[in-house]
Image (cartoon, helix red, strand yellow):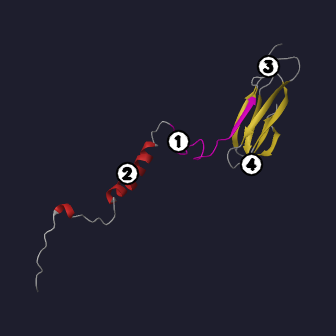
Amino acid sequence: MKRQPMISVPTSQCRREQAVPGARQLIATFLILPSLIVWGGCSGDDPTALGGKSSPLGASPAQISASPNPVPAGPEKGTTTITWSAGEGKTGEVYLVTRDGTEKLFGGHARKGSQKASFIRADWVYEFRLYEGKEHAKVLASVKVTREKGNP
């Protein structure tokens, strides 16, 4: 086998070929960056940050409120507005707990809504419960409404 003579090339003209330009940078980006994002988002300060018990990731929690609460005192029956939201992708119904402990449908089947309660008296605590769906089985949220005693 015949050997070919070696040709001398100045190092300034040599270029190292790489299989993938910037391969080290790509590897570092795809391996290290996702780890930093995950670790940075898990500080432990907020149990709901990654979809903890209160609501799934990105979903809004169920809410019910009354305004005003307490209802101001006055000679006639007072009025408050019950506002509810069953949460993202859910529907619900609002029930009023009656004096004998049974529940009466107050707000219709909807994802969210608002309705006036014009029967609030000072001698009773009114509880409104938001149930998921129409099954009347799972309470999503509740609010108790009171009324100030005395004349304004």
Badge 1 density bin: few <14, some 14–19, many ≥20, Cα 10 Å: some
Does the stretch in magenta take in 50?
A: yes
137 lies left or right of 73: left
Image quarter of residue 108: top right
Of tags 1 and 2, which is closer to the observer?
Answer: 2
Residue placed most toward the observer, 13 or 68: 13
Find out whether the residues at labels 4 and 2 contact each other: C-beta distance under 8 Å. Answer: no
The answer to which quarter of the image holds residue 97 is top right
Q: Look at mark 1 in the image and give the residue it sits on.
A: 49
Q: Which residue is mark 3?
A: 72
Q: From mark 3 to mark 2, how far is it between C-alphas? A: 59 Å
Q: Looking at the image, do the residues carrying marks 1 and 4 touch, with CB atoms under 8 Å apart?
A: no
**Disc 4 and disc 2: Cα gap in Å?**
44 Å
The picture quadrant where one finds residue 1 is bottom left
Q: Label 4: few (<14), some or many (≥20) within 10 Å?
A: some
Q: Main secondary structure of the magenta part?
A: loop
Per the image, label 3 sits on a secondary structure element best described as loop
Mark 4 or mark 1, which is nearer the start of the sequence? 1
Q: Which residue is mark 4?
A: 133
Q: Which residues are magenta?
A: 46-66
Marked residue nearer the N-terminal end (3 or 1): 1
In the rendered image, which residue does mark 2 sit on?
32
- Disc nearer the start of the sequence (4/2): 2
**Could you tell me residue 92's position as x and y percent?**
75, 45
Q: Amino acid at mark 2?
A: Ile
Mark 1: secondary structure: loop
Residue 45 pos. (x, y %): 48, 36
| Image position of 17 (left or right of 119) | left
